Amino acid sequence: MPGTTTGSSTRDVQLIPYTTVDGIRTFKDSQILALYERTIRDSTVKTIFHDGSITSGDEFLNAMKHGDNLLYVVMYMSETVGILWLNRFKGPSCYAHFTAFSNIWGKDTVAIGRDSMRQILFMESRDQKHVFDLVYGLVPQRNTRAISWLEKIGMKPVGNIPLSIWDEEAGESMTGTLLYLTREELKP
């Protein structure tokens, strides 16, 4: 898994990594559990974890603390507005997952998402090389709201892949839409 940086900010968006700094976690377990609870209160938990891989706060905490995930808490104007996590690291590419909390819905979600992705794609390692060249994601085709939002933040759809996503609640595979983002798509 690639190295992490401390929170970096452009405009009013700040990504704060859930990591260990000098032996101390940047967030308490209870704070990470509270993020999961927000997805329950916002009624987004089944949309986010449609595959059934995360079914409780403890599973979420364990996946973010010990799994192959790099979690960021998204802050906007000093308020927690969402979470972003990366996984499936392959060289300078990774999958990205993002959810905005209800306190920001209908407001600046496109700008926040775009700026969050900009920070990920322009993140540099200690040797001043970009950590990621490509961020991609696979979203259920039926989640047209998420796909539309991802396109607005600059992600480009590649196409649909039949039976590529598991839906635990329905007990069947469903079609996913593959999207990608590079630094090129983020240029003004």
Image: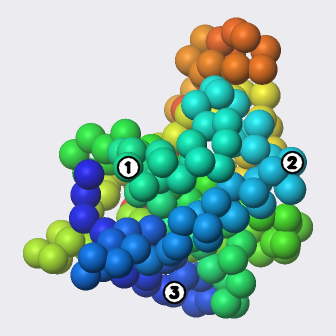
Q: Residue at x 67, y 36 (%)?
A: 55
Using residue 170 as the reference point, say whether residue 129 is left or right of it.
Answer: left
Using residue 123 as the reference point, say whether residue 163 is left or right of it.
Answer: right
Horizontal and vertical percent position of residue 61: 53, 53
60 in relation to 14, above or below: above
Distance between the alpha carbons at the discs numbered 2 and 3: 30 Å
Q: Please name the colour scheme applied to the rendered image.
A: rainbow
Q: Residue at x 61, y 37 (%)?
A: 54
Q: Which residue is mark 2?
A: 43
Q: Residue at x 86, y 55 (%)?
A: 42
Amino acid found under the numbered disc labelled 1: His
Q: Which residue is mark 1?
A: 66
Circle nearer the N terminus (2, 3): 3
Using residue 43 as the reference point, say whether residue 59 is left or right of it.
Answer: left
| Mark sitting on residue 39 | none
Using residue 118 as the reference point, say whether residue 175 is left or right of it.
Answer: right
